[in-house]
Image: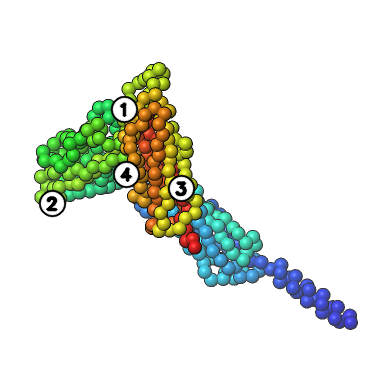
Amino acid sequence: MKSGVFLSLAFLFVFESLLAQKAKFDFEEETFDFGSIKEENGSVSHKFVFSNVGDTPLIIQGVRASCGCTTPAWTKEPVPPGEQGFITAKYNPKNRPGSFRKSLTVTSNADPASKVIYIKGMVETRPRTAADMYRYKIGDLRFRYQSMNMGKVTTEKPFTRSFDVYNDSENEVAFKDQVYKPEHISISFQPNVLAPKTKGKLVVTYNGEMKNDFGYVSDAVKIYTDEEKEAEKSLRVIATIEEYFPPMTQEQLAQAPRMKFEEMVHDFGSMKKNATVHTKFTFTNTGKSPLNIRAVKPNCGCTVSKLDKYDFAPGESGSIEVEFNSTGRRGNQQKSIVIFSNDPSAPTQRLIIKAKVANLS
């Protein structure tokens, strides 16, 4: 009986001794400072060296970086007690100017099971090239974007904005008088001849009243140069057109039309994919002058709006029927329908429809 108790105690002692045995990190450094690095020189890396000062082999199960800009690598084999292993951190400074501090979380069988090490430094921004600043290239000319955005344009008077163009060649490039454009847009060049490696301007003048539309609009334009290749350059001019209303007194506003909706948001809730649903947004002209709806513009081809008439007397109500088609869509959806009217207090109003598209039986 005494021998049995002795064996049990011995077994328990050995078991507890085994449980007490742990692998343990001892890093030469837990934070590394790269100092100042140049963005144009590309990625930098540092190897963190550690020793296993524990009693059992150390096994790294994974290393998770706090940022996609940091790529880790590590010793994949078990590190015996007294031996060394490594964790490498590779940092990519591209498009990340300024100071940085990133962490790598190491998961292992060591005590503790989670360990965090750090890299830090300062990225010096690389000099920007013409290709960086003017990303869209046609022939020898570079543009910032394919679309020239006029921003908000009103119907009060023509609006002018200039856009940079860069000659990326070793030769002069001359603009021709030939320009393909709609009547409400005019385009000129400053200068008419661009010297090599120099910047010029495309000057665009936009007549919002002549366009006779509202909201977001887009027009194709083409300009021509004397280049042998790609002399024709296709661009777009985009704008958001709003009606201009001159300043009005409180008395004038009180006599104006006013478009008031009963509700401006409708949630269809859950619906099947490849299905069509409908709703109506009801409104009333609560003003004292005739209301005219200038335009109704959904922001998606999946949404169709219908309006039976566009003129409403004071006190008269109407409705805008909206159809939403869920074909090709999945999950939470939110679409808008923008209403443009002669209500000077709210000439642009936005209706919202929502839905959750799923496989429903």
Kind of residue indicated by mark 1: Tyr
Measure the alpha-carbon separation of dots 2 and 4. Answer: 30 Å
The mark closer to the camera, 4 or 1, is: 1
The residue type indicated by label 4 comes to: Pro
Q: Earlier in the sequence, mark 4 or mark 1?
A: 4
User: Which mark identifies residue 127?
Assistant: 4
Q: Mark 2 is on which residue type?
A: Lys
In the rendered image, residue 42, in percent from the top left (x then y), is placed at: 37, 53
Dot 1: few (<14), some (14–19), or many (≥20) neighbours within 10 Å? some
Upstream in the sequence, badge 3 or badge 2? 2
Look at the numbered disc 2 and give the secondary structure of its residue. loop
Point out the tag, 1 or 3, that comes first from the N-terminus: 1
Looking at the picture, how far across and down is residue 69, in whole percent? 44, 54
Horizontal side, residue 130 vs residue 305: left or right: left
x and y percentages locating residue 350 in the rendered image: 41, 38
Name the residue tied to disc 1: 244
State the residue at coordinates (33%, 25%). Answer: 245
Spatial CA span between label 4 and label 1:
43 Å
Marks 2 and 1, Cα distance to the nearest angstrom?
Answer: 43 Å
> Tag on residue 229?
2
Residue 202 appears in the picture as rendered: yes
Looking at the rendered structure, the kind of residue marked 3 is Lys
Mark positioned earlier in the residue sequence (2 or 4): 4
Q: List the residue tagged with mark 3.
A: 354
